[in-house]
Image: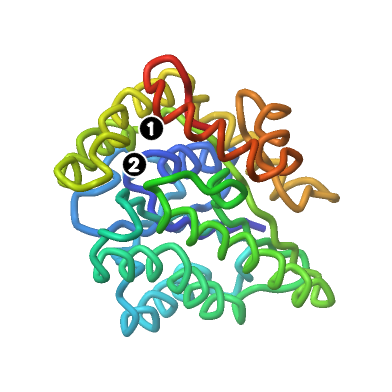
Amino acid sequence: MDKYIVITGVSTGIGQGLAQHFLSKGYKVIGTIRKEGDGTDLHSIPGFIPILYDVNDKPGVETFVQKVKEALGSTPLFALINNAGIAIAGPMELLPDEEFERLIDTNVLAIRRITNALLPLMSEGSRILNLSSVSGLFSSPFTGAYCISKHALESMTDVYRRELASFGIKVMAIEPGPIKTPIWNKSKGTLDRFLDSRYGSMLKNADKIIENAERSGLPVSEVCRAAEHALESKSPKTRYLIHQKKFLFRLVSGWLPDTWADALVARTMRGGEKHRAF
């Protein structure tokens, strides 16, 4: 019997890589795209089913679910991968409310809406995989809204996992560090609008930090490998940390006193080119 996976946000980056990976493994992939013409690299691959849907469209979730039902027929949904998300950088003090709220809706509320809407289509053995981030484990300056959303997603993952365990539905999170995707080019210069603020001196090295993160980024295939284990293993991990320096990251994010971690972050912001963000 065919196995169907819903993946949100498959137009580019990690979402596109996940869709290509699971299609190559013989899965049927139902992928969301925001506008016509997105995800063109996937359309020619057998088994790919595109659905035009913006995860911020709250009323549209019912139509989206109906289209998923039509694609599934009588087959239960095997897996949902909540990949769609956005990142908006800026000082917490200055980030406009509408931008903060849009990010929270995309990265947190939409995931809950979509998960709840698709749960009735799942059965024992189904799986939910949330694309979180190392930012859900360690909060960095000037990415506060993103960090807050990923911390919330970490908690949401735990809650769903514990609530759905008795129904045989497994819920996991992938926590990538820097991954080589187009997001890095999109990020450059995004903090320039705040350079004239009192945070300007701290933001001047932002692009250098982004460039260093881009250079140290792991390939999307690392995320795909973790996702495959999460969906196919009889005993998947609850979390998959993907980082080039796992021990160092765990040390800074979980074991060091806050004051020491704060000092390392301050050093990174000063050094820019010499030091990499965690």
Separation of disc 2 and disc 1 at Cα?
8 Å
Nearer to us in this view, 61 or 98: 98
**Residue 217 at x, y percent in the picture:** 48, 25
Nearer the observer: mark 2 or 1; the answer is 1
Position of residue 197 in the picture relative to residue 59 (left or right)? left
Taking the spot 68% from the left edge, 27% from the top edge, the residue there is: 248
Q: Residues within 10 Å of mark 2 (few under 14, many from 20)?
A: some
Taking the spot 33% from the left edge, 37% from the top edge, the residue there is: 183
* Colour pattern: rainbow
Nearer to us in this view, 114 or 216: 216
Residue 208 picture quarter: top left
Taking the spot 46% from the left edge, 68% from the top edge, the residue there is: 71
Q: Is residue 215 above or below residue 60?
A: above
Quadrant assignment for the N terminus: bottom right
Which type of secondary structure does the marked residue at label 1 adopt?
Answer: loop
**Residue 259 at x, y percent in the picture:** 63, 42
Quadrant assignment for the C terminus: top right
Mark 1, residue position: 181
Q: Amino acid at mark 1?
A: Thr
Q: Residues within 10 Å of mark 1 (few under 14, many from 20)?
A: some
**Residue 274 at x, y percent in the picture:** 43, 14
For the view shown, which residue lies furthest in the top direction? Answer: 274
| Mark 2 or mark 1: whose residue is earlier in sequence | 2
Residue 181 picture quarter: top left
Mark 2, residue position: 12
**Residue 47 at x, y percent in the picture:** 46, 49
Q: Amino acid at mark 2?
A: Thr
Position of residue 104 in the picture relative to residue 4 (left or right)? left
Residue 214 picture quarter: top left
Dots 2 and 1: beta carbons under 8 Å? yes
Taking the spot 38% from the left edge, 23% from the top edge, the residue there is: 272
Which type of secondary structure does the marked residue at label 2 adopt?
Answer: loop
